[in-house]
Amino acid sequence: MGLAATYTMLLAGCGAVSAILFSLRQSLLAVEFGTGPVLWVLAAATYTASLAVEIRARKPLRAPILVGVPELRGDGSRKALLTTGIYGAVRHPRYVGATLGYVASAFLANYLFLYAALPVFLLLLHTTVLLEERELLERFGNPYRAYMARVPRYVPRLRG
């Protein structure tokens, strides 16, 4: 489809969803549970974990790779499979970081909607991961298959 068409559709879709959510904001945010020091500590700890994961995940990546330009162009400009650092512990650290950030936001705001929307967020994120892994299998083949067998998707294995 191409880079310009993809980003145009993505921005239009995000704009439409944002407009819908904005128009429904009163009912979506009607139930608020309050906040307090325990939730602030949980939110701070979860945000800190999210930030640590995100920094480690982004460090080896250039800006065009972070936004998916090679995949959208189909030029395969990233020839090497990244399997070191945090990518040696989990296959999708950026999605782990995003999930931790979402949970931290839910703790901080403490609205029913954020907790209720979490399963939808996780389902959409997991669907994205499955599509991404299919593309990575096509691009890298057996080396990615071996990486999948060795490195867990989201939660690092505990080592003795």
Image (cartoon, helix red, strand yellow):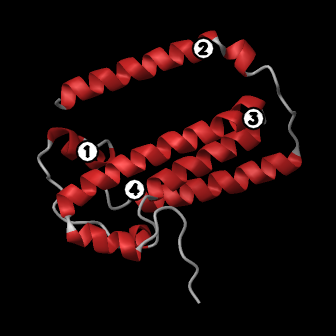
Nearer to the camera, 30 or 49: 30
Residues packed near mark 1 inside 10 Å, few (<14), some (14 to 19) or many (20 plus): few
Decide which of tag 4 and tag 1 comes sooner along the chain.
4
Rendered-image quadrant of the C terminus: bottom right
Please name the residue shown 82% across and 25% down the image. Answer: 31
* Occupied quadrant, residue 51: bottom right
* Residue 23 image point, x, y percent: 61, 9
- Write down the residue under mark 4: 58
Amino acid type, residue under disc 2 in the picture? Phe
* Occupied quadrant, residue 85: bottom left
Q: Tag count in the figure? A: 4
Decide which of tag 4 and tag 3 comes sooner along the chain.
4
Q: Which secondary structure lies at badge 3? A: helix
Marks 2/4: CA–CA distance: 31 Å
Residues packed near mark 3 inside 10 Å, few (<14), some (14 to 19) or many (20 plus): some
Marks 4/3: CA–CA distance: 27 Å
Marks 2/1: CA–CA distance: 30 Å
Decide which of tag 2 and tag 1 comes sooner along the chain.
2
Label pair 2/3, CB-CB below 8 angstroms: no
Nearer to the camera, 87 or 157: 157
User: Does 156 sit left or right of 37 as displayed?
Assistant: left
